[in-house]
Image (cartoon, rainbow, N blue to C red):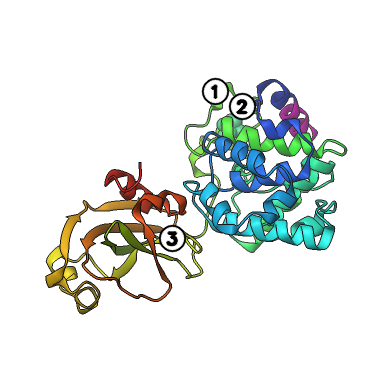
Amino acid sequence: MDFFAKNLINWYKTNKRELPWRHTSDPYKIWLSEIILQQTQVVQGLSYYYKFVKNYPTVKHLAKAPIDEVMKNWQGLGYYSRARNLHEAAKYIVMHYKGVFPKTYLEIRQLKGVGDYTAAAIASSAYNLQHAVVDGNVYRVLSRVFGIETPIDSGEGKKQFQNLANELLPKKESSLYNQAIMEFGALYCRPSNPNCSECIFKYKCAAFAEEKVSFFPVKAKKTKVKIRYFNYFIFTNKQTVYISKRQEKDIWQGLYEFYLIETPKKIKNELILKTKEVRKIASLKESVIKSISKEYKHILSHRQLFTRFYHLEIKHSIKLKSTINVKIKDLNKYAFPRLIERYLIDSGFIK
Ligand code: SF4
């Protein structure tokens, strides 16, 4: 097993990308980078890392910031529960640890939004503690090199991979090793088109030897994708517009949106505009349909959203639950899901 860690660390020393969080042992900054990089590519996450470090240089600054501002800074990165949890955890650190980032794995693991993987990554990178990271990259690399066919989404698989990862972790070099395996999975042993021909494990890798690279890692269940149909109504009235904060406990919780009617299937424009709900709010005779957008398709890991936007200028003010009336020119101050932001830019509501 020794061959694995040694080769990996040597490879990492000459092949790693220069990234800002690799030059710090500040646990706060490492935590920020780890949360930003969950479900996000390094290229996309980098500018957000710089933005957060600049706007919130310490955990106390982050804790003090209004949540709407944090969400706005997160806009475009997706998986918004990460921003909500980051803010909650920052407040928790200020309240329980006087703003000093916790120093043990268990304390770090208790922070909101921090799972086993993130806790191990922070504990090893910031404090060089002996905790092996296991995430998608690690499952892929280990399953391929060691030819492990146990499904990674089974209880047995999780245990087996965690045990192997712990065994492989070299004493005193946990930080380097953890970063190395993640970098190797991202740059060489990629999900598709891995660079096997130039790989340091070419002659040791079970998957490569058996020509079964794409077979690994094995999953028991396939992700079910749910299709949803959203119809958003942008009610404007004299340079103002109605928006509401999404309360549902889902990935868009805390973001702003417009009046939403969800339908079980695609519905014709004439029909959705004639629904009781819309007629009641907009008193259609007195309203002007300013535009009906093209259909926007938004793909998430478990969802496909088909969405149309209906812009109606209404002659009267309206009262809707949890809805606020804001100036159109101020729309860019609110955090919207990427899907809605795309529409707002396309339609000229925000520049
Ligand atoms: S040989 Fe290919 S599959 Fe095996 S570890 Fe290297 S890149 Fe991954």
Quadrant location of residue 5? top right
Q: Nearer the viewer, residue 47 or 285?
A: 285
**Position of 313 relative to 175 (above/below):** below
For disc 2, the neighbor class at 10 Å (few under 14, some 14 to 19, many from 20) is: some
Q: Secondary structure at mark 2?
A: loop
Residue labelled with disc 2? 202
- What residue is rendered at 55% in x and 47% in y? 217
Classify mark 2 as within 8 Å of ligand 1 or not, answering yes or no: yes
Residue labelled with disc 3? 256
Q: Nearer the viewer, residue 181 or 259?
A: 259
**Position of 199 relative to 312 (above/below):** above
Cβ atoms at labels 3 and 2 below 8 Å apart: no
Q: Amino acid at mark 3?
A: Tyr
For disc 1, the neighbor class at 10 Å (few under 14, some 14 to 19, many from 20) is: few
On residue 50, which mark appears? none
- Marker count (numbered): 3
For disc 3, the neighbor class at 10 Å (few under 14, some 14 to 19, many from 20) is: many
